[in-house]
Amino acid sequence: MREPQPVIISCALTGGMTVPGQSPAIPVTPEQIIGAGLEAAAAGASLIHVHVRDPATGRPAADIGLFREVIAGIREGSDAIVQPTTGGGVGQTIADRAEVLRQCRPEMASFNLGSFNFGIFPVHHRPSMAPWEIDYLESTRDYVFRNTFADMYLLAERFRENEITPEFEAYDVGHLYNLVHLLEHDIVQSPVHIQFVLGVLGANAASLEQLIHMLQTLRSQLGSNPFTWSVAGVGYPAEFHLGAASLMLGGHVRVGLEDNLRLTLNARADSNGALVQKAVTLAHLLDRRVATASEARRILNLRSEGVRATEVTAASGARGDPATSSAESVQA
Ligand code: KMH
Ligand code: ZN
């Protein structure tokens, strides 16, 4: 029997659409975020998704000095791929969000595929929350997570000029058609890596049916073009239910306190590492080996792996030529 592809477990450490008062486990300072990243990597995460926060308040930030410190700290202590956000948080412009690409030139960064309402106002107000946190949550009653075509064209330019591989974040099925538009107009290039982020209030639900619907839509739209995909289920038990489905279907898995704060029905997660550990256990139960960082780089066709598939396939004259190392590692 053929061994399935190893699974890339990514860990989203802190987020921009959570506030620290939701859980004492959410890392805030650069030291805490670096520590959480190293713990997640040691537990089996080969890809670390990072946001940064103002260390004094915990408010999501776009400060390049903080990004530099966090990216360098995680890289120094592990060989995991460090993937900064370009999604940011409430109040950040696309220019703020894109700056990390030019200033830090990471191997990979997130690329959000469309605008939608992103509501976190139903989050329970806790006594541990500062006034700004309550305001932040409440402000999303009237918040659109903006990713217009102009924004996406600008972002794509920054990714291209800095040779950064995007992880495309798709929250709803329409976002996949936006991606098809970007591919058809050569604004972004194949092969693509997609993260299905399901369960945000304002976008698609974290259900098995919707995951399958989005996966099938992507497959039919991309035809023979290869791609890789992962799932981030938002909330509990979505993070692990959709993670298990992805493990069965050959996809990759994202966990982390950005998306979910619970380890079990009755226990809150006390660290990102604990969430990664549970994903590793699930992977082993379902016969998926966990990818090392260098395997993840090969699967995702990152620039540190040498010649990119787009260059190879252009030279060989065949898009998605199965003879290329990246194409053999992707699944359509
Ligand atoms: N928490 C959302 C904003 C991003 O950072 O670019 C999903 C996300 C996207 O991880
Ligand atoms: Zn994020």
Image (spheres, rainbow, N blue to C red):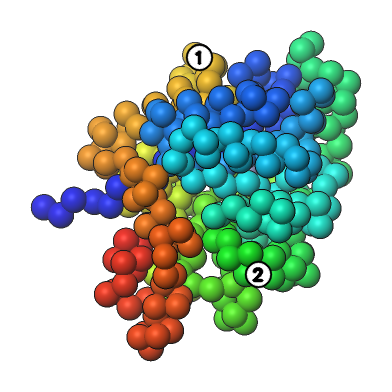
Residue displayed at 32% across by 61% down: 329
Camera sees residue 312: yes
Q: Quadrant of residue 67?
A: top right
For residue 183, the mark is none
Residue 331 to residue 34: above or below: below
Circle 2 residue: 161
Q: Position of residue 238 (x, y in %)?
A: 50, 35
Residue 135 to residue 93: above or below: above
Residue most extreme to the bottom: 317
Asked if the residue at label 2 sits under 8 Å from ligand 1, the reply is no
Residue type, label 1 = Ala
Circle 1 residue: 267
Residue type, label 2 = Glu
Q: Quadrant of residue 163?
A: bottom right
Q: Position of residue 280 (x, y in %)?
A: 35, 32
Badge 2 vs badge 1, beta-carbon distance below 8 Å: no
Q: Position of residue 14 (x, y in %)?
A: 64, 32
Which secondary structure lies at badge 2? helix
Camera sees residue 178: no
Of the image marks 2 and 1, the number of the one nearer the N terminus: 2
Q: Quadrant of residue 34?
A: top right
Residue displayed at 38% across by 33% down: 44
Residue most extreme to the left: 1
Disc 2 to disc 1, C-alpha distance: 45 Å
- Quadrant of the displayed image that contains ligand 2: top right
Residue 269 to residue 318: above or below: above
Residue displayed at 54% across by 44% down: 82
Tell whether 1 sits left or right of 90: left
Which secondary structure lies at badge 1? strand
Q: Position of residue 317 (x, y in %)?
A: 38, 88
Residue displayed at 45% across by 75% down: 310
Q: Could you tell me which quadrant the C terminus lies in?
A: bottom left
